[in-house]
Image (cartoon, coloured by chain):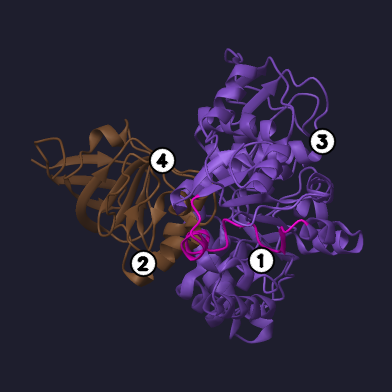
Chain colours: A brown, B purple
Amino acid sequence: MPILLHCHKGIGPAVTGVALVAADNFSARYDLDRIKGVFSRPTHKLAGQSYAGRILVLDGAKGGVATAWMLHDMAARGVVPRALIFNRVNPILAQGAAFGGVALVDRFDGDVTQLIRTGDVLRVDPAGGVVEILNRNERGIEA
Amino acid sequence: MRLTDEEKAMLAGELGEPRRWAIAHQIAVGEFFDAADFVPVSQAHIMADTESLGEAGTRFFESLAAAPEADRRVRVPTITDPRGVDFAVYRRLGQTPAMAALETRAITALRAFGVLMTDTCINYQTIMASIRGDHLAYGDTGVVIYSNSMFGARSNFEGGPSALAAALTGRTPRYGYHLDACRRGTKRFRLTATPGDLTEWGALGGIIGATCGSYWEVPVIEGVEAIPASDALKHFGTALASFGSVALFSMPGITAEEAVFDGRPPAAIEIGRSDIEAFLARYAALGDKLDVVVFAAPQLSLFEMEAVARALDGRRVHPDTTVIVATSPEIKHAADRMGLTSRIEAAGAVVAQGICFYQSYARELAEANGWTRLMTNSAKLVNIIGGYGYQPTLAGLERCVASAVAGRVL
């Protein structure tokens, strides 16, 4: 039976995709090689992993304002996460998602980086304020 | 969100496409943060470096800038954050004509909106200080945290698209640091040692920022013994905002407002000399060949420019090391006039204006020049630059300069 996770009403279109989860924070400027589409910051928990087309599930937003532009450019080049799921974001991520047309939700009951596992297949519905786990990665590790 | 008749007219496109796009974008963001309505702003500050904009962002600017002048003109004084390219030095730094061409397109579009090209992240030191209670749409985390904390201004972090939207509508959604409820203290710190130089103030900001780790935390810092200089609080604030995404701090007796806690204050977290030393030690790389030394992030004040000139007087930068000093156009002109630029460049360093290094295609610069080991006195910069492929070292101005002369990390 699908698991439903309720959150605050979000931004962007409803999408389906596979989760990439870490208890870490996010900035497009600080953490990504946006040309190669991988996490490039050596100390990031997702260092070396590809984010293109994945639903990123992370804790919060880092400093910096560049993400507000960068999600738009990443989307235009087709090397962009499918959706962003956070415990709580700052204005920059919300502005970036709104400008770039990228699905974004936050503010769940509980720690979303614990509720969702890497490899879970998710349906994110920002307008409804709900994330559905369609197919649980029962191995609990890399899919 | 509750909309006025004028806001409804903007949304209906009656005031032109740029203002329609702007208010629609602002409503999406405002509703995400449960804003009840809009608040008028007195200034906007746009971060629009071309590395972030990319081709897509530049095209977006150009499409709005093609609207009739009455439709595209900004409604409040609007200034800019550092750009991606300084046309006078970009070839020396290894940037490409394609980067300069994209920059030219973005500047042309920004000017069409009536934006004033200040190209600075230290507008609070060089352009105009804000007033307590002033609602703003500032687009640089260091600018926001300094203005909110030291002047008592009210701004959220407004990324480039949102700052442009605020400039076009003359307002911003009323959420976050526009509201009293968000400006209460949430974490408490007590200093048992006072930071010495600007680097140590940055380190302190990094320590507190990493502990806070959220835009919605407001740290209250007690135990600051003497009034810090503007440059010290600049480095402190930019590092706090960079490491923690923090937008407001309180130092009782020093900041414009003294944040109160909801209920009983939490226990204070003590920060002492050993914490600052441990923070600096994380970036140590004694003896490493040194590729590039950067004084930027934030841009240097006139006093910092003078300190760099003094440290470089009579010395010569090692031929295998590049030294970049970045400041605002206003300070660069002052430094030219006062002979500081020629003193810095006589030692072999590059003085750039209107850029701030990390916003200037840092990854491509590293690849073009073969740079890996970077040394700086900016805690903010060491936090950012690792993701661009650099190995950063954090040290005070004097040690950075001595290392630049030696060509290795001292």
Query: Residue under circle 1?
Result: B167
Query: Residue under circle 4?
Result: A25
Query: Residue under circle 3?
Result: B229
In the rendering, at what x and y percent does residue B190 appear?
66, 17
Secondary element type, mark 4: loop
Secondary element type, mark 2: helix
Same-chain check, marks 2 and 1 = no
Secondary element type, mark 3: loop
Query: Chain ID for label 4?
Result: A
Query: Residue under circle 2?
Result: A75
The amino acid pointed to by label 3 is: Ala
In the rendering, at what x and y percent does residue B377 appear?
66, 41
Segment colored magenta: B347-372
Badge 1 local density, few (<14 within 10 Å), some, or many (20+)? many
Query: Chain ID for label 3?
Result: B
Label 4 with label 2: CB-CB less than 8 Å: no
Instruction: State whether residue B272 appears in this view.
Output: no
Give the residue drawn at x 32%, y 32%.
A111
